[in-house]
Image: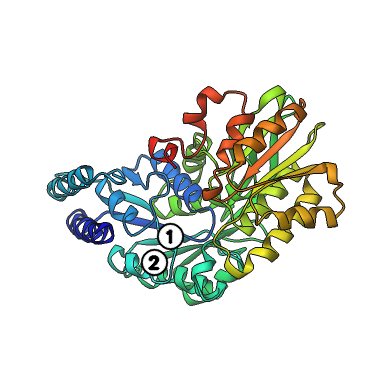
Amino acid sequence: MIALFKRIVVFLLTWEARLVLARHKPQIIAVTGSMGKTTTKDAIFAALVAGGLHARKSEKSFNSEIGVPLTVLGCDNAWNNPILWAWNILRGLVVIAAPSYPKWLVLEVGADRPGDIETTARWLRPDVAVFTGIPDVPVHVEYFDSPRAVVREKKRLAAHLKPGGLVILNGDDANLASLRTEYADACITYGVSSRFEYTALGYEIRYERDTPVGIGFSAVHDRESVRVTLDGAIGYPRVYAGLAALAAAGVAGVPLVRAAEGLAAWEPQPGRLRLLKGIKGSIIIDDTYNSSPAAAFAALDTLGSIRTAGTRIAVLGDMLELGRFSSDSHRELGTRAAQSAGMLVTVGFRSRAAAEAARDAGMRDEQVRQYDQGESAHAGKELEPDIREGDVILIKGSQGMRMERAAEELMAEPERAADLLVRQGKEWERR
């Protein structure tokens, strides 16, 4: 009965969303990839708004068969409340007839299983498709035959572009190289490893009184260069999101300098390499929204690059939905943690392989702690006595591991958890 109700709701909301797009004809920027979609979407929105454009973005991570139409209609997730779902459907009818509507939509399009992007892209028909990156072992690979199948599914977004549409892609990602060739006449690239249409140079972590506060880099496009500063979060993933935003803003006619000003005012989302004040003068890198091998390795590289007189501590929960790649990925995670951190705390039975690999890579027994599934808060609480001023604590794990509970135990302002951490609503409290 629940499955039937969901299918009916998805059908009705999608039908309404298609009517809205047909009537109001907004320009659609759709963002896909296996990492960084939400960060990139938010960055693009910030750059567009800075240029004075009337835009709407997906709230949180609305990127599914139901999340995309909800964003088009401007409705909220009603969770398990049938009355609120009925209200959303009624609101959709009002939006169809409304006299005004945003000129730009910035949407995430995700894929948990084969066919997800094809189903959405077929009716969405974006004007611009932004590809953030598809690592060799992407998130959700458990439900696909192979990583290459994930790549093929993501690429379906470009296949359904409107006539004259553009592709914006991460030029550093080898898995996207075929798109660059296929859409050579309608492709804009960005990256850091060589010169692309939009290139970042001079990346640095910005400090105030020896405390990391954000990052900075120079964005180069054609013969123009602008300094970009992004506060509140850290790491190269944020650079890539900023470059994608500058490229998308350029397509929309926003000047490079104005778009960079929008990025400077961009507030980082919770749980995505966000910098938080920790207890006893420590710093938390809160990356608890989700995890995959590539994202976890990038987070560990970020941890290892921070200048500190204290200890670098990695608190890592299981990476889920990796299928047959799980064991090897967790072992590599432990090896990388031994290179980047002076202490490793693991949560979950999959991460036991990470702890073992960290010891094999040279970590001593006293540098490694292990906790079971569901013990993220306990892991954070038991770490408290060992925290010292200047310590930097990376906290990361897949959604189901609820690693934000460890962050709440270690943050200096736990009373602000509802504002600073992910998954703090009433629906999540029940889980």
Tell which of 76 and 229 is nearer to you.
76
Q: How is the image coloured?
A: rainbow
Q: Quadrant of the C terminus?
A: top left
Amino acid at dot 2: Ile
Q: Secondary structure at mark 2?
A: helix
Q: CA distance from mark 2 to mark 1?
A: 6 Å
Residue at 55% x, 69% y: name it.
176
Q: Secondary structure at mark 1?
A: loop
Q: Residue at x 14, y 45 (%)?
A: 94
Give the percent coordinates (x, y) of residue 269: 50, 39
Horizontal placement of 260 versus 397: left or right?
left
Please say whether residue 213 is visible from this viewpoint. no
Q: Earlier in the sequence, mark 2 or mark 1?
A: 1
Q: Are marks 2 and 1 in contact (CB under 8 Å)?
A: yes
The relative height of residue 177 versus residue 105 in the rendered view (above or below) is below
**Residue 19, position in %: x, y?**
18, 58
Sort mark 2 into few (<14), some (14-19) or many (20+) by Cα contacts within 10 Å: many
Which residue in the structure is indicated by mark 1?
110
305 vs 142, nearest the viewer: 142
The answer to whether residue 380 is left or right of residue 163 is: right
Labelled disc at residue 26: none
Tell me: residue 226, above or below residue 408.
Answer: below
Mark yes or no: residue 237 visible: yes
Residue 326 screen position, x and y as percent: 63, 64
Q: Quadrant for the N terminus, please.
A: bottom left
* Residue that badge 2 annotates: 117
Q: Residue furthest left?
A: 97
Q: Amino acid at mark 1?
A: Gly
Q: Nearer the viewer, residue 68 or 205?
A: 68
Q: Nearer the viewer, residue 128 or 82?
A: 82
Q: Residue drawn 72% across and 50% down?
A: 301
Count of labels in the image: 2
